[in-house]
Every structure is written in C-alpha cells, then in structure tokens.
Image (tube, coloured by chain):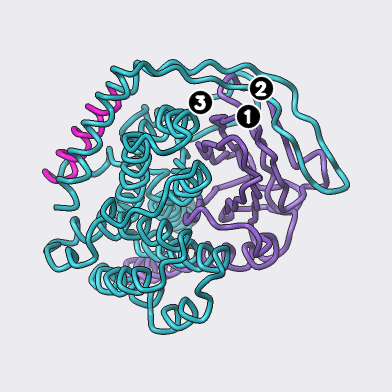
Amino acid sequence: MKKIAILFALFFGLMLTAGSATAQCDSIASACAKRNIDPSFISDGQQYRALLVNSDETAEFHVTFYGGTLYRLAACSGMTDGNLIFTIYDSQHNQLFTNSQYQNAPYWDFSVKNTVDCIINAQLNPTTNSGSGCAVVLIGFKQQ
Amino acid sequence: MLKMKTKPLFIIGCAVTVTMFLVAGCRSNSASTDKSLQPNVAKVDSNNPTLLKINNQIFSIPSPIQTALLIKKSGYPYNKEMLNSSDNYSKYDTKYKKALNLGIYGADLGYISLYDQTQDALSYLASIEKLATDVGVSDMFNATLVKRFQQNMGKEDSLLSMVSEAFRRSDAYFKDNKQNDISSLVLVGGWIESLYFAVQANNSQKVNAKDVVTRIAEQKISLQNLVKMLQPYNDRPEYAKLSKDLASLADVFDNVEFVYNYIPPTVDVKNKVTSINSTSNVQISPELLKQITDKIVALRNQIAG
C-alpha cells in the first residue's frame, strides 16, 4: 500500500514537473524575444520549441528564408544567454552558420540574397546544461 | 535482504520510466508529429556521427506578411475585394473552421495594415477578436491591442509588429495547451491566404509579375512542410480532407523546378551578420501556374465559404 502511495506521489510530482517544463518554454521564449529580437524585426508569428532530453539530442527546424530579406534568429534555452548551440545547413547540407564559432551568440542576423530552404539544428550547450532543457528558436524579419 | 534492497530500485526504475514517458509526451507536438513519418528510432547524422537525432523535427511556415509586402512592393494597389469579408466570421461554426479562418483574417489584417486602411483594419480586428475568443486566445486580441492598433494607425511597421506578435503569442498559447492541431490550422489558413493574394496579384497583370510568380513557385517546400505538419491529425475526417487537398496541390507543385547553387556565406562578425550568398532559381511554366492558381482559388474559397 505504501509503495503504491509512493508511486502515485512520484507520478503526480512528475506530472507537475512536465507541466512546468511546458510553461517554462513560454517564459524562455518571452525572455528570449525581449533580449534578442530588436523591435525593428517583425516576428514570423510562430514560436519554435522542443524539449531536449540532453545535450546529445538535436531539434531540427525546417525553415524557408526568402530572398531580399534580413532575418534575425534568436536561440535560447534557460533564462541566460549562450545555452543553445544552433547550426544552419542548406538543403545540400552545406553548413551556412554555427553560433558555436561566436561564443554561442544568442542571436545572429542573416542577409538572404536568394530564397533558400534550410535546416536549423539546435542542441543544448553541454558545458552549461547537465540535464534536459527547452530549446526555443524565434525568427524575425525585415525587408532589405 | 537482497530482495529488500531491490524494492527501492524498482520504484526508482518506475519513476525513471514515467519521467521518460512524460518528457517525451510534453515535447512540442510538431516534434511528435513526425513519429508518424519516420520510424521511431534514433539515427546518426552522416555528417556528424556523434550526433544523435530522435525525430525532433519542427516545421516553419513563412509569415503571410512577407508575401503581402512583396505584393505591395510590386505595385499592386489595395484590393479589398480580394479579402475574405470580415462579416463572414459568423458562418464559421466549428473550432476547425474558426482556426483556419483566424489564419486567413490574420493575413488579411497584415495586408490591410500595409495599405494603411484604418476602417477596414478595425473591422477585421473585430472579426479576429471574435474568432480568437472562440478558439481560446482572446487575451492576445483584446481591447488593449485594439486601442494600441488605433493609436498606431499610419505606422506600418508598428502595426505589422503588433499583428505578428499577437499571432506569435497565440501560437505559444496553443503549444502550451497541447493544441498544436489548432496552431497548425491557423498557419495553414494564413499560408493559403498569402498564396491566394499572390495568384490574384498575378492575375491582375498590374504588378511586377516576375517576383510574384517566383514567390508562388517558392511555396513548394512550405507546402510540403504543411502536409507533414497536419499528418498526425489525419484520423479526423476534416483534417484528412484538408491534407488530401493540400497533398493534391503539392503534387502539382512537384513539377516546379528549383535550382540551387551553394556559394559560401560571408560573415560580418562585428555586426553579427552573415550574408547567405547562395543562388536559387525557380522554373514554372504558364500551364503549371494556371493549375496552381485554379487549385488555390478553389481551396481558399471552400475554406472561407
């Protein structure tokens, strides 16, 4: 009977943890937008996020960047900067950018001349994340 | 004694299993959607053998405002007739229809804001507020937004930022509340309306048609992403019908030729800007454009009623 009670307690405790992880994603996204998306950029109206179990796991974001546009990408996990490593590949898997070469910069701008379809891979920074975390990517744009 | 020691281990084991189950379950729905597309096994990226991927794919759909901006830039004059009438909101009697048309009205409001049409903007905002309330995101389109919108009339960038931010917050709400199906419908509605704008602009022959035609052809990948995004909900008849219609459109788009040429990017570290220098070119025949136009007009009118 005691064991069942313990299991139930654990189950509901973990349910609460999972719920707070989802809410945490939204808090991270709001803070990320405030810190890293300049008001001159218009949001694309979406909030991309994935809960990553550890720093080995990768979230894959499929994105089309239109030509003649300046994009800002902000990538966050947690309430401080530098916790998410993001790398952009084109459709032929050529690497176009990785923030790991720039101190895991939480945002970067991309001046796109011609329309490209890309994949953004996002991973938790293993040096700052020992466990799971919510990966959030936000995209803003302005005409050039 | 040994048996007693294994009991806590059993409980911890159960707890770990439950944790893993819950963590997997609370991932974004977009991520979970692809379990139906690919076998649920870990795979190794061939370019990075140490990278473990577990079906964690998320699809982005470009903002409808970007196509509206292109249409205005191409010289297309304001055309209210092209929009879904703001009075139609009362015809949408299910959450499915409301969500799709919330996306359509959102694209319409973005388009109207670009042309600084104050009265139209307010009537579309009122219809959006009603649909938003019915799908549970009334907070994002409340009286405060309407007031801010009125105060910023004439400031195109501010209006577009407000509309986009309200839709981003709605998207977040749907994802927080495990309503990714509704989030997907709003995106589908916005995408269909923006493509509808583009084919109408092209038909009018008053615009710099080349850029608009290119934008139409460039929708090939976004459409494929939409079809994948809806896939997890295809056990419901209305979603299955929508997916079938979009898949049929995607079949036509398959004939669009997209030629991509990789050119290494250049980086301005000081300003944190990378220039993507690769070139791309799309080829679309007039016959193919006609087929796409016919299909998108039929689909949009069927959804908007």
Report how far apart the C-alphas of labels 2 and 3 lie in the structure: 19 Å
| Spot occupied by residue B79 in the image (x, y as percentages of width and height) | 33, 53
- Dot 1, crowdedness within 10 Å: few (<14), some or many (≥20)? some
Q: Which residues are magenta?
A: B237-251
Determine which quarter of the picture holds residue B107. Answer: bottom left
Cβ atoms under marks 2 and 3 closer than 8 Å: no
Across and down, in percent, residue A131 comes to: 62, 53
Q: Residues within 10 Å of mark 2 (few under 14, many from 20)?
A: some
The residue at which mark 1 appears reads as A89
Residue closer to the observer: B183 or B296: B296
Residue A63 coordinates in the image, percent (x, y): 52, 38
Asked if residue B141 lies in the magenta stretch, the reply is: no
* Helix, strand or loop for disc 2: loop
Could you tell whether B262 is left or right of B2 in the image? Answer: right
Instruction: Identify the residue at horizontal 45%, vertical 53% (top origin).
Output: B23
The tint of chain A in the picture is purple
**Residue at the extreme front of the image, as rendered:** B206
Dot 3: element: strand
- Using the image, name the chain to which the residue with label 3 belongs: B
How far is disc 3 from disc 1 in space, using C-alphas? 18 Å
Q: Chain of mark 1?
A: A
